[in-house]
Amino acid sequence: MTAPRQRPLLLLDVDGPLNPYAAQPERRPHGYATFRMRPPSWQASLAASRPYGRPRAAEYTKPLRVWLNPDHGPQLRALPFELVWATTWMHEANAFIAPELALPELPVIEWPSIDLHRQDPEGLHWKTRQVAAWAAGRPFAWVDDELTEADRAWIAAHHDQPALLHHVDPRRGLTEADFTALADWAERTAAP
Ligand SMILES: [Mg+2]
């Protein structure tokens, strides 16, 4: 008997695919609910942005507005993938995002380095090399709103398993077409 084939990984960005932050602020996208969250990293970034101000009690800090579509949790769980957080939220995605989407606690890519302003010598997204290292030896699909052709080409050349870098429009978040594309890719990848 052969061991059952491992499912491919689905690496999930939060801001963009799940939280369509770039939609018009006064017009919440259809199907989404509004959440106001105070993850510790958000509070810390607010505090750091006003170094000379007096620290404020947590309840007075401005919460982060997050739009989430509760249907996305069941839709993601129905896909033939192992879900993984690939987001700057890191473990806060399990604490704040997963419960609202009825997702279980998921593995987290702990970025050794989050440098949003570093210029990559090959023009890659700051996550790309770290994703390849984390997913070494495994097929993966990756949904993110900041992927480019440079990332696709680099992963194709440096990752020895099938990989789908799937761009999601941060004005709309994950759509039916995105779920279909992910399911189709998983089916093609699993075919002998
Ligand atoms: Mg994003």
Image (tube, grey):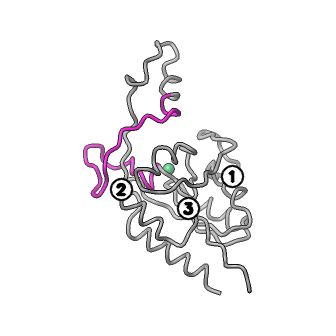
The N terminus: image quadrant: bottom right
Asked if the stretch drawn in magenta spans residue 25, the answer is yes
Residue placed under numbered mark 3 in the picture: 83
Q: Is mark 1 within 8 Å of ligand 1?
A: no
Mark positioned earlier in the residue sequence (1 or 2): 2
Disc 3, disc 2: CB below 8 Å?
A: no
Name the residue type under label 2.
Asn
Q: Which labelled disc corresponds to residue 69? A: 2
Asked if the stretch drawn in magenta spans residue 188, the answer is no
Q: Is mark 2 within 8 Å of ligand 1?
A: no
Q: Residue at image x 43%, y 34%? A: 38
Nearest-to-viewer mark from 3 and 1: 3
**Disc 2 secondary structure class:** loop
How many numbered marks have been drawn onto this rendered protein structure?
A: 3
Foreground: 133 or 90? 90
Q: Counting other residues with Cα less than 10 Å from the Cα at mark 1, is it few (<14), some (14-19), or many (20 or more)?
A: some
Residue placed under numbered mark 1 in the picture: 130
Q: Main secondary structure of the magenta part?
A: loop
- Distance from disc 1 to disc 2, alpha carbons, whole Å, reads 28 Å
Mark positioned earlier in the residue sequence (3 or 1): 3
Q: Is residue 142 left or right of residue 57?
A: right
Q: Position of residue 122 (x, y in %)?
A: 69, 53
Name the residue type under label 3.
Leu
Q: Position of residue 160 (x, y in %)?
A: 74, 70
Q: Position of residue 182 (x, y in %)?
A: 50, 71
Which quadrant of the figure has residue 83?
bottom right
Q: Position of residue 22 (x, y in %)?
A: 38, 48
Name the residue type under label 1.
Gln
